[in-house]
Amino acid sequence: MPKQIIYTPQLILDELVCELEQRERFDLSERLKAAGTLLPIMAQPQYERCVEDVLAGAVATIIHEFCYAKNFVPIVVVCEAGEKKRDTAHLKMVIGTLQQMNYLEKVEFVSKEPVHRYLCLKRLRNAEANGNEFPAMLARSLLITGVDKKTAGKVCVTTCSKGCTYRGVCKYQILMENISDGQIPLLVYNTQQYQSALKASKLPKARLTVCSPTNSRALLGDGIRSIRAKDIEKLLLQSERLCSSARQKRIAVLQETQAIRKSCKTLFGMAENGIDEQVARLLLASIHGGLLRIRRLCIKEMTLWGNERARWNKNLNRTISDIEALQKSPFTIVNGSLRTTL
């Protein structure tokens, strides 16, 4: 009886590289050889995957998640603006080849275009009402084609309101809703497009992001929040030291700080054994609730005179705000820090 072949991610990658070389796509096969060293990294349960070669990282993620694990969480690939066109073409070639090799079923692939290239159905109808004429096919298009630049400026997307009467039929709005709902498995953005989508919350809530380390650092200031275990401990010590001297209130504050410490120990301890997201969110909610109760108990003490009390007030409010942002986003735990992921 012949030995059954077990198709591991590495074997799938090796066969993909071999197939591309047979097609004389040596430019692409050479880049993908680097993906072999990334496969173990891409197999880790992390939302953000920072790699030097974004194409290699994207292919390693696609092979592990889509071809091997059959986990179709949307993959967002963030390219440098000057490399997006080339990387998109290479990704399309890889996807097509994997489909022909029966490792991958058909997946929807969207390379985000500049917003001015998309058609706004409302602006088109308004322009028609003002006497402008357009090709009949344009109203059924996602992208603006077949018109000159001046005419395109009259019908391109500028801003979209939630109350737009064409919201249910406008192809651009349908595309954006499908992206937000996680219905498109593979998305390609350049850095600026991704930053804009991140700020506007126009990305799938559950996603895997592949980007360069440089882009990751550039994006950290836009919508990224974090809390550190040691900062929460400092905040708890401040609360214990500066809270009311009234016995009953002090006991209540100490009960809250001890409960928060217990939740923090469990939450940040997950980094070693893997994150159970449901449990992590419950623990985060518990910490958030405890801090809100401390603020309510100590509202008078925090407003008293003194720089230390002012810092305590500021730290407590900032931590509560950061946790509220974390509760709305995917997050990961790295080096004692819990932060939103790209």
Image: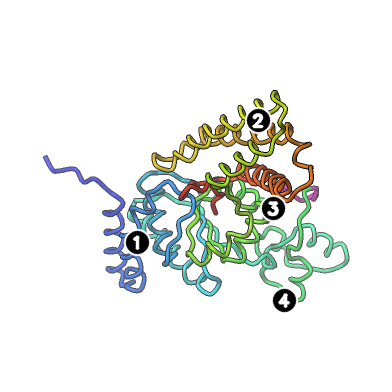
Mark 1–mark 2 Cα distance, whole angstroms, equals 52 Å
Q: Are the residues flagged by discs 1 and 3 in contact, CB closer than 8 Å?
A: no
Judged from the image, the secondary structure of the residue bearing numbered disc 3 is helix
Judged from the image, the secondary structure of the residue bearing numbered disc 4 is loop
User: Which residue is most to the right?
Assistant: 130
Write the start and end of the magenta stretch as one range. Answer: 163-173
Looking at the rendered structure, the kind of residue marked 2 is Val
> Which residue position is annotated with label 4?
148
- If the image is split into quadrants, where does the C terminus sit? bottom right
Identify which residue, 72 or 332, lies in the foreground. Answer: 332
Query: Which of disc 3 and disc 2 is earlier in sequence?
Result: 3
Q: Answer few, some or many: residues within 10 Å of disc 2's Cα (few below 14, many 20 plus, some between 14 and 19).
A: many
> Which residue position is annotated with label 3?
173
Does residue 263 appear left or right of residue 130 in this picture?
Answer: left
Mark 2–mark 4 Cα distance, whole angstroms, equals 67 Å
| Tag in front: 1 or 3 | 1
> Which residue position is annotated with label 2?
253
Q: Are the residues flagged by discs 2 and 4 in contact, CB closer than 8 Å?
A: no
- If the image is split into quadrants, where does the N terminus sit? top left
From the image, give the main secondary structure of the stretch colored magenta.
loop
| Tag in front: 1 or 2 | 2
Q: Answer few, some or many: residues within 10 Å of disc 1's Cα (few below 14, many 20 plus, some between 14 and 19).
A: many
Looking at the rendered structure, the kind of residue marked 1 is Ala
Judged from the image, the secondary structure of the residue bearing numbered disc 1 is helix
Mark 1–mark 3 Cα distance, whole angstroms, equals 35 Å
Q: Are the residues flagged by discs 1 and 2 in contact, CB closer than 8 Å?
A: no
Q: Are the residues flagged by discs 2 and 3 in contact, CB closer than 8 Å?
A: no
Identify which residue, 286 or 19, lies in the foreground. Answer: 286
> Which residue position is annotated with label 1?
35
Mark 1–mark 4 Cα distance, whole angstroms, equals 42 Å
Identify which residue, 261 or 216, lies in the foreground. Answer: 261
